[in-house]
Image (tube, rainbow, N blue to C red):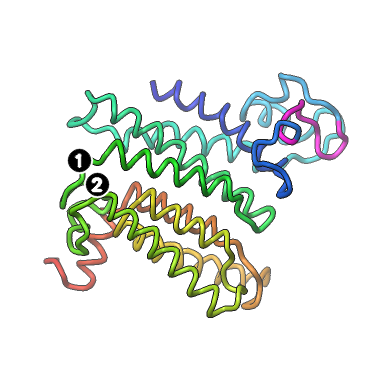
Amino acid sequence: MRVLLFLFGLAVGSFLDVIATRYNPNKFLLEKKVIGGRSRCAKCGKELGWFELVPVISFALQAGRCRSCKAKLSLEYPLVEILCGLIFVFVPFQVLTPSNIQHLTSYLAAFLWILVFLTLLLITLIDLRLNLIPDEANIFLVILGVLLIILTASHFSLAEGSFLGPYAAITGLRQNIWLNHLIAAISSGLFFGLLIVITRGRGMGGGDLKLGAALGVVFGWPDILAILASAFIIGSLFSLVWILRRKKTLKSAMPFGPFLAIASVLIFFFGGDLARLYLKFLNFIPQ
């Protein structure tokens, strides 16, 4: 089953990379005229055959080069395909547990979470290339978040409904799932809005604000706090590395969407462990 999911994910990853590469900010994200048509070599323009488009395998057999002009192909292609394969394999098994594996709603929730992380990967690719986040992607995340709320509302409690596990109860707001996720979206949006005002738009952009609010709808409170904190820590570490390598300066603009995406992955898979380590560090729970 996992092998089939991984192979299907590879194929989806190939299509996802096409969308990210061909995305035009002046067009709809899934504009048929933009993403339609056969794939071509970016260097020589030759139309690629089906045997040149097999995820990962074609790249490996061609030694990462175009068969016609021998131009070097970007590692982005196989990496995106593999990441999508991993999303299809690991996300469902994080959602499905022995206690809920018999319920149809659990499988629907797993499918929605796959779509969430595929969307975050697409946002990452586009933000890295163009330094912007499509509004359509943020709107889609909000829709996915609302659907997840509907599916999981009956299981929302002090101990359930958060990737931080029982530690989520410390922050309160566990009585109503709709209020919980609404507060998370508003808080995240206000936080980014304040940063935009303070930095006069040089530190954050409107796309980051919308993505932060959308993630609030998807993850709820206090998961969004953990995501924001993790994103800024990860962003600071990456910035330090880039500055030390003299590829960036303190005044250089950096896309923040990828850091929010990475932080979302960390909280989704390791939120409870990270919360426990943090509370132990603060001596809130026994060592």
Q: Residue at x 86, y 33 (%)?
A: 45
Check residue 76 for magenta coloring.
Answer: no
On screen, residue 242 versus residue 104, left or right, reads right
On the image, the x and y values in percent for residue 215 come to 42, 53
Give 65 or 265, whichever is nearer the viewer: 265
Badge 1 density bin: few <14, some 14–19, many ≥20, Cα 10 Å? few
On screen, residue 21 versus residue 70, left or right, reads left
On the image, the x and y values in percent for residue 13 come to 57, 33
Q: Which mark is residue 131?
A: none
Tag 1 and tag 2, C-beta contact below 8 Å: yes
The magenta-colored residue range is 34-45
Q: Earlier in the sequence, mark 1 or mark 2?
A: 1
Disc 1 element: helix
Q: Residue at x 44, y 57 (%)?
A: 213
> Which residue is the site of mark 1?
155
Does residue 264 lie above or below 151 as drawn? below
Q: Quadrant for residue 72, please give it.
A: top right
Which secondary structure dominates the residues rendered in magenta?
Answer: loop
Q: Residue at x 45, y 25 (%)?
A: 5
* Residue kind at label 1, given as amino acid type: His
Q: Quadrant for residue 46, please give it.
A: top right
